Image: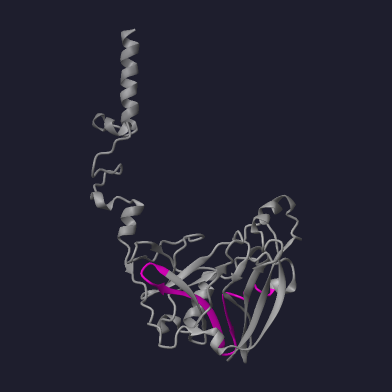
Amino acid sequence: MKKIWLWSLVAGVVFLSGCGVLPQEENMLSGEVMSGEVLTGEVVQEEEVLTGETLMSQFPKCTPIQVRPFAEWEPIDIDKVAVNCKYEQGDIYFSSTDGLGGRCGMISIFNEGIFNWDDDDQVKWPVCQSKEDGISLWEPIGEYKVLAEFMKRHWLPEKKLIESAGILCQQRWEPREEFFCGQTKLCKSLKNLAEYWESWENYFIFGTRPYGEDSYRNYLVINDKLYSKGEGSILENSQWYIRQEWDRRVSQITPEKIVLRRLTQGRLVEPYKSNPDLLSTLWEKDDGKTVIGSYKVKTCEIPL
């Protein structure tokens, strides 16, 4: 029995030696690794250990551009320059559908280039980190690359009109779900033509600029001019169903003009105008056919 036990012990030592496990390394078998030691036998400094945090800390910093200040006449009030305005009226229907949806992705202009904040579908390492908040930044790919090329083609980094622009930020909502205006042609006309577009020598793009200390606002740039696209407001006591007024949408652009549409004059109709609490009783009959209000679409042109 002693011989059998002795040969078993020798075999165990030989096996462990063949695997490169030495007695002084027994602490590694428990998952502990000594500071500064790597299993290959090479010794590196602790700050060089390949962790994501360490690698990111070694990336260069990129600085967001400082948009130029507004000129005295900016942003331009579209109501003061628009022509050939007309109004069309439509109905607002009760609906329990959430009007929000879609995903808005942005790219931003930095002194070092145009970069993407989103790492979706990225296969390369980030280019740099934002100097402001340390967020990782990537070279734009896919549809974001197309947008970045559009911005460069119109010299937006040099003109410093906007800081950021997006994909599906202006088109992520369907008007029938955003305004509860049904399937009518008038309702569908409230969807934006695009986030950006060019026709002959004319172009437009929606983009954001800093507003105040901690917020941003969206503006419409048309041929290097900054326009206010208007703000939205909800009708009081309408349980959030009635958009009283909303921002402007680009409907068409030609060599001669750009056509803009805007929902306005949203209101409740009777009996909901006199008794808004009746809106709460419509959930059981959510057939999309109950008219609870009305609105108008204001269509105007800006000569180019």
The answer to whether residue 6 is left or right of residue 145 is left
The answer to whether residue 31 is left or right of residue 203 is left
Count of numbered badges drawn on the protein: 0
Which is nearer the eye, 204 or 144?
Answer: 204
Magenta span contains residue 229: no
Query: Can residue 187 be seen from the camera position used here?
Result: yes
Q: Is residue 226 above or below residue 239?
A: below
- Which image quarter holds the N terminus? top left
Q: How is the image coloured?
A: one colour
Residue at coordinates 63% horizontally, 62% vertically from top-left?
Answer: 241
Which residue is most to the front?
A: 274
- Which image quarter holds the C terminus? bottom right
Which is nearer the eye, 73 or 193?
Answer: 73
Magenta span contains residue 210: yes
Q: Position of residue 12 (x, y in %)?
A: 34, 23
Looking at the rendering, which quadrant does residue 291 occupy? bottom right
Query: Can residue 96 be seen from the camera position used here?
Result: no
Residue at coordinates 39% horizontally, 62% vertically from top-left?
Answer: 136
The answer to whether residue 266 is left or right of residue 39 is right
Which is nearer the eye, 215 or 40?
Answer: 215
Which residue is most to the top?
A: 1
Q: Which residues are magenta?
A: 189-215
Q: Position of residue 99 (x, y in %)?
A: 62, 61
Looking at the rendering, which quadrant does residue 110 occupy? bottom left
Q: Position of residue 233 (x, y in %)?
A: 55, 69
Q: Is residue 236 above or below residue 5?
A: below
Which is nearer the eye, 29 or 65?
Answer: 65
Q: Is residue 75 above or below residue 113?
A: below
Q: Position of residue 106 (x, y in %)?
A: 48, 68
Residue at coordinates 63% horizontally, 74% vertically from top-left?
Answer: 265
